[in-house]
Amino acid sequence: MNTQLRYPSEAYLSECHFETSRSRGKGGQAVNKIESRVTLVFNLAESRLFDTNEKERIAKGMKTYVSDEVIRISSEKSRSQLQNKNLVSEKFIELLAKSLIVKKKRIATKVSAGVKQQRRKSKQLKSEKKGLRKKPEW
């Protein structure tokens, strides 16, 4: 998936910093003691790895994670802080690569004559079939 990225993933992760906090939800007393939730914070405005067009594309592609040009992605799936950090890093790189892909514009095409003819033929057959269901006129 790193095909769109110019630099290795370590370069992007070097501009990030990680915050830890206590995880929510079930887990008993361990939830109250261990900071297993990891949040990746990436300041898009201060990044030197992207030009303005790429920053706009990233902001548009990651709009659910961006607020005030800062990207925040968090994970609390695992009980391990290290595993959550790895999950967040992978997700960040994957989202970066996805958002940098430039989609091609769709070129409108006309329906071919053969397809039109086939459609007319199928309509005619349906019409005849339904016509046979009617009561005969005397």
Image: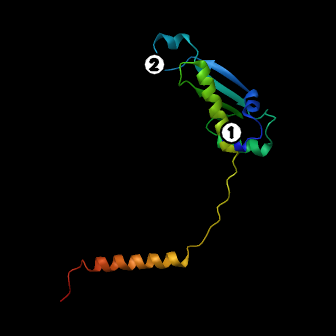
- Coloring scheme used: rainbow
N-terminal of the pair, mark 2 or mark 1, is: 2
Q: What residue appears at the point 62 percent right and 33 percent down from the top-left corner? A: 91
Above or below for 137 versus 51: below
* Residue 64 falls in image quadrant: top right
Q: Quadrant of the N terminus?
A: top right
Packing grade of label 2 (10 A; few <14, some 14-19, many >=20) is few
How far is mark 2 from mark 1, CA to CA?
A: 31 Å
Above or below for 51 versus 73: below
Say which element carries label 2. loop
Q: What residue appears at the point 72 percent right and 35 percent down from the top-left corner? A: 69
In the figure, is residue 117 to the left or right of 38? left
Percent coordinates x, y for residue 115 in the rendering: 50, 75
Percent coordinates x, y for residue 22 in the rendering: 56, 16
Between residue 130 and residue 121, name the one nearer to us: 121
Q: Which residue matches tag 2?
A: 26
Percent coordinates x, y for residue 39 in the rendering: 63, 25
Percent coordinates x, y for residue 85 in the rendering: 63, 24
Mark drawn on residue 96: 1
Q: Quadrant of the C terminus?
A: bottom left
Give amino acid for label 1. Answer: Leu
For this orientation, the residue located farthest to the left is: 138
For this orientation, the residue located farthest to the bottom is: 138
Q: Is residue 68 visible?
A: no
Q: Is residue 88 visible?
A: yes
Between residue 8 and residue 95, name the one nearer to us: 8
Between residue 107 and residue 45, name the one nearer to us: 107
Say which element carries label 1. helix
